[in-house]
Amino acid sequence: MKTSVIESEGLYPKVRKPDASLRNLALGILLQAFRDIVAPKKSASKEWELWRQDALDWFSSEEKDPGSFCWVCDVLALNPKELREWLALYNSCDPDRQREMARKLTRFQIRH
């Protein structure tokens, strides 16, 4: 007697990473938020201050909509608490230490 295996993605979805294009989008959003905080493009209009504050607000948000901090962390399988702790440390450091931390951030990579 032969038994067959019943598979249902609805009941038992396969564990998969989001596709590369979605991960690239999420990574781009995260890196831009970091850039707006650690290396804002300063202009005479002081618009950079608004972008920096917007990025800080984005990191503290608990929203789960596409493009939100929690969504980005979910797509990239990152721990939001650890990223927020890094940001708090960065904000509490002196300018020399901030530059060092920002330099390391430029080497930040997520494996696909």
Image: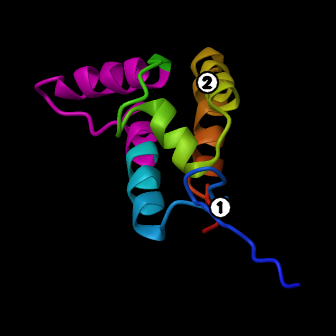
Q: Residue furthest bottom?
A: 1
Mark 1 lies on a secondary structure that is loop
Quarter of the image for residue 85 reads: top right
Mark 2 or 1: the one toward you: 1
* Lateral position of residue 59 relative to residue 42, left or right: right
* Lateral position of residue 30 relative to residue 91, left or right: left
Residue under circle 1? 14
Name the residue: 39% across, 17% down. Answer: 57
Q: Position of residue 15 (x, y in %)?
A: 67, 58
The quarter of the rendered structure image containing the N terminus is bottom right
Would residue 54 be counted in the magenta stretch? yes
* Nearer the observer, 29 or 75: 75
Q: Residue furthest front?
A: 1
Q: Estimate how packed mark 1 is, as few (under 14), some (14 to 19) or many (20 or more) residues with alpha carbons within 10 Å.
A: few
* Lateral position of residue 87 relative to residue 38, left or right: right
Quarter of the image for residue 63 reads: top left
Colour scheme: rainbow
Q: Amino acid at mark 2?
A: Arg
Magenta residue span: 31-59
Mark 2 lies on a secondary structure that is helix
Residue under circle 2? 84
Whether tag 2 and tag 1 are in contact, CB under 8 A, the answer is no
* Nearer the observer, 4 or 35: 4
User: Is 1 drawn above or below residue 37 in the view shown?
Assistant: below
Q: Position of residue 91 (x, y in %)?
A: 57, 19
Q: Amino acid at mark 1?
A: Lys
User: Is 95 drawn above or below residue 79 in the view shown?
Assistant: above
